[in-house]
Image (cartoon, helix red, strand yellow):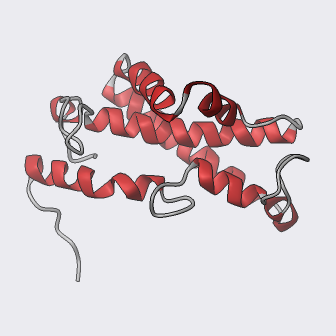
Amino acid sequence: MERLRNEDFTRPDTIGGGDWSARDLLGHLTSWEEHALEALRAWREGEPAPVQRALRMVGLNAVNAETVAADRGRSPATVRRRFDSIHHRLVAEIRSMSDATWDAPPTTRSRRSLGHVLGGIVGGPGGPFAHASSHLAHLRAYVESVTGPVRRDP
């Protein structure tokens, strides 16, 4: 995404045949990592993850639409900085966890491990923790359509 100029980054109707821009996609990915951070905070306090309640109440499409709409009011630089900050915070939180915490259920009502449930929050069709990679082909196609093919080392 760093290869995109701001006008290309914010151009709508460019990602995956839908109405999203690259900014929308980055905001979308950021929101799910933020949901993961909020879940970790809630679980530490013995509460359910807020995103799980939101998904039950309004559904996936509404959760996604709300977060994408919020980022449309932010500058490209802010959206990029926000992603970097939240991503680094999530990685740091995961790295700081003990194996016992990772392997234990996040709440008394959960039957799965914290790692499994967290992986589902930032998961995708490719599995746990695979949300970003599920969008990569569409993003790569758009970036290459604007800037030319990405050079890959052999």
Report x, y in % for residue 30. 48, 39
For the residue pair 111 and 47, the one nearer the viewer reads as 111
User: In which quadrant is the C terminus drawn?
Assistant: bottom left
Residue at screen point 20% across, 29% down = 12
Residue at screen point 50% across, 35% down = 60
Quadrant hosting residue 58: top right
**In this rendering, is residue 23 above or below 116?**
above
**In this rendering, is residue 98 above or below 61?**
below
Residue at screen point 84% across, 55% down = 105
Left or right, 151 with reference to 36: left
Quadrant hosting residue 23: top left
For the residue pair 53 and 84, the one nearer the viewer reads as 53
Instruction: Count up the numbered dots.
Output: 0
Report x, y in % for residue 37. 67, 40
Report x, y in % for residue 128. 57, 61
Report x, y in % for residue 29. 45, 42
